[in-house]
Amino acid sequence: MNPRKSPPRSLLRWKPKRRQTLLESAHDVGGISVFIYLFAKYFSAFHARAMAEESGFALLKRILLSPECKIGYHTLKVLMEVACDGDVFKPTNLADVPIMLNIDSTAVVRNVAIFQHFLLNWKIWEKAKQGVLEMLLATIDILVHGSHSYYTFKHHSVPESAACCSRF
């Protein structure tokens, strides 16, 4: 049979082998988590642009400085997770202090803007619960200490990244 004389497959009528719902099809391609991941990736890029354009850091700073905002260990943990690439804290079973410092952490500061706007802003942390400011200072000490495994990397990269952030 000559391939040039055979009818193109796109003109043939395709019949589905079986009918599936959207949920079944989503399960076949990896589950709902794939769609959630794609949705989050899209909005992550969108919100990063909006955060820079609409001065989102100033808005968040205003919220954190408001008297209604309660600054605690969870706030510190969330900000450190956003600013660093590794685990800085370990969970505890205590209600008063739900996290403890991971002294063996190899975390590196990746988001210098979060550090500059929130973690190094003493006005935010002066109204924090008892012990939170001390944990913040101990965490910063662990991240910049000379015995940290990535000390030489951070010693050179953090000032350079801060200079880049201020220029752009």
Image: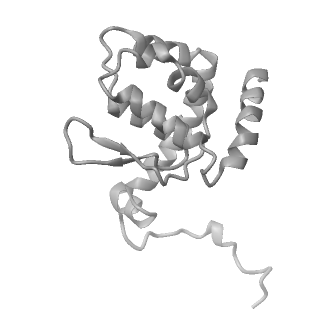
Q: Position of residue 88 (x, y in %)?
A: 46, 46
Seen in the picture, residue 82 relative to 122 is either above or below; the reply is below
Q: Residue furthest top?
A: 67
In front: 113, or 156?
156
Seen in the picture, residue 34 relative to 85 is either above or below; the reply is below
Quarter that holds the N terminus = bottom right
In which quarter of the view is residue 143 placed? top right
Q: Residue furthest bottom?
A: 1
Q: Is residue 73 left or right of residue 9?
A: left
In front: 41, or 123?
123
Q: Residue furthest left?
A: 95
Q: Residue at x 32, y 16 (%)?
A: 69
Q: Is residue 106 left or right of residue 101?
A: right
Q: Residue at x 77, y 29 (%)?
A: 164
Q: Position of residue 11 (x, y in %)?
A: 63, 66
Q: Residue at x 37, y 71 (%)?
A: 18
Q: Residue at x 38, y 63 (%)?
A: 27
Seen in the picture, residue 28 relative to 37 is either above or below; the reply is below
Q: Position of residue 104 (x, y in %)?
A: 48, 54
In front: 33, or 159?
159
Q: Is residue 63 left or right of residue 48?
A: left
Q: Position of residue 47 (x, y in %)?
A: 55, 28
Q: Residue furthest front?
A: 146
Quarter that holds the C terminus = top right
